[in-house]
Image (cartoon, coloured by chain):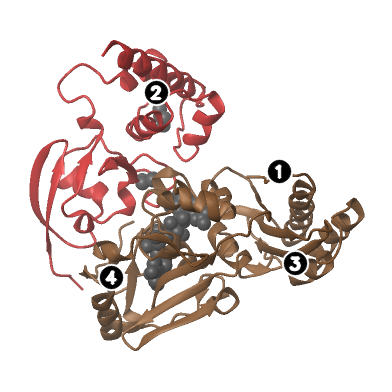
Amino acid sequence: MKPAAFDYHRPDSIEEACALLAEHGADSRILSGGQSLVPLMNMRILSPAVLIDINRCRDLAYLREEGGVIACGALTRQGEAETSDLVAARLPLMAAAMPHVGVRANRNFGTVCGSLAHADPLAELPSVASALDATFVIASSRGRREVGADEFFVSALTNCLEPDEMLAEVRLPAIPEGARCAFLEIANRAHGFAVAGIAACVEFGPDGRCSRARLSAMGAGDTTARLGSVEALIEGQRLDDALIRAAGAEAAAAADPAGDVHADSAYRAEVIGSLVRKVLRQMQGAVVER
Amino acid sequence: MSAKKVTVRMKVNGKDYVREVEPRYLMADFLRHELQLTGTHIGCEHGVCGACTVLINGKTGRSCLQFAAALDGAEITTVEGIAGDGPLHPVQEAFHDAHALQCGYCTPGFLMTTIEFLKTNPEPDRDEIQQALTNNMCRCTGYVNIIDAVEDAAKRLREGAREA
Ligand SMILES: Cc1cc2nc3c(=O)[nH]c(=O)nc-3n(C[C@H](O)[C@H](O)[C@H](O)COP(=O)(O)OP(=O)(O)OC[C@H]3O[C@@H](n4cnc5c(N)ncnc54)[C@H](O)[C@@H]3O)c2cc1C
Ligand code: FES
Ligand code: FES
């Protein structure tokens, strides 16, 4: 099928993009990589009257470190983040997740921020952003505001943006030295939609106990979400086999997954429990698993 | 609703084109219907089959997920452009010799994906080849010969580079 007709705008700056959003509001959509939006338009699930193509806003393509935080602009491609030395060194969890985000032809165009804005509960990058306590910088012609992941992700395919707002930047705090990260997912088909996945970053104190645990699940509910009860169970403890089993059981019990053609709800919950055990087991050793 | 047309300038396989298009015109249709470059095939129109893969400014992209209007100023290489009027490209030769196609519908997408892949990974193992081709669908061959062809193409390109 072919997309319905739309008016096309190609602003050169974020100010112009925001002015167009203010003018057209809910009739308009931002086009970044197009890797999620264009399929939906081709299938006529979405038929926006106005497209605001931000691919000419070159100032929005950047990855830079600012005081221990990695800032990623709205036009930074997933493929650029995947091969970035800065991401490899400071955000190894994102580097580990990136190869799972579609195939290279998608990542060559798809943007980090586009994936976050799309807010698919089975997408990798929202779970990474949520596990790393990302800050979402939102712009409109009314000004800027910042929100955290729990506010940004509202429900499946729904973010907190008002019709005149866009995601300008995501800010990801660098992973502390010595923290262990792991990203694992199960999918029926490589690069197809995942059944479930876990993004995890755990810090350990000098006594070997877990000082801070951050785990986020894909597929556990209708949005990417932190596994708060699992984190609480782990913090202050040693990662021994009994604790890992208990953490897996808690993750499965707390999950409230949707059922679909790829996996029913009970199976997804079981997979989440098993993935939590696996990521934690990887952290028992000294290696940082990719 | 009929939207205002947009002017696009594009270099496709080394040749310059200027056209007026509706914004909703997909790049895959633009290539096939405006430029008569029908080597780029359309399977699914939502990014999953890989048949429509072309090189956009040197990088693989699904031409069914791009609007031609948005690619104003871009350089495109389609399957027609990889060897021009000369002898087959080494990747084409390898596909031919390994019987890596039957109906050939998927082949242009496989060739474009393979050309980019072997530039970044000139000496891949079979697992890596399989990974790189996961989102290119072939309904005929069963993939084994395609993987053989990519392995052979890698060898040909490495040997070619040594001779050159
Ligand atoms: C074959 C295939 C396989 C895929 N596999 C995966 C996968 O395994 N995992 C995965 O996570 N994704 C997958 N995707 C989706 C892909 O990763 C997309 O790149 C990503 O979801 C969206 O990024 P984009 O830049 O292409 O956004 P677009 O498609 O341009 O936009 C997506 C949505 O976000 C909005 N938007 C975009 N940018 C902004 C912004 N800055 N501010 C506000 N709103 C914005 C758009 O209006 C639209 O509603 C796949 C896609 C395809 C075609
Ligand atoms: S037609 Fe474009 S990927 Fe299938
Ligand atoms: S050769 Fe027929 S689809 Fe691949």
Ligand 3 shown in quarter: top left
- Asked if marks 4 and 3 fall on the same chain, the answer is yes
- Asked if marks 1 and 2 fall on the same chain, the answer is no
Earlier in the chain: of badge 1 and badge 4, it is 4
* Element type where label 3 sits in the image: loop
Which chain is home to disc 2? B
Report which quarter residue A38 is drawn in: bottom left
Residue holding disc 3: A255
**Marks 1, 2: nearer the viewer:** 1
Residue holding disc 1: A287
Q: Nearer the viewer, residue B155 or A39?
A: B155
How far, Cα to Cα, is label 3 from label 2?
45 Å
Q: Are marks 3 and 2 in contact (CB under 8 Å)?
A: no
* Element type where label 2 sits in the image: loop
Q: Position of residue A113 (x, y in %)?
A: 43, 65
How far, Cα to Cα, is label 1 from label 2?
43 Å
What chain is the red one? B
- Asked if marks 3 and 2 fall on the same chain, the answer is no
How far, Cα to Cα, is label 4 from label 3?
37 Å
Please give left or right for residue A107 compared with residue A253 in the image.
Answer: left
Which chain is home to disc 1? A
Q: Tell which residue pokes out farthest to the top in this image.
A: B163
Residue holding disc 2: B101
Please tell me the colour of chain A.
brown
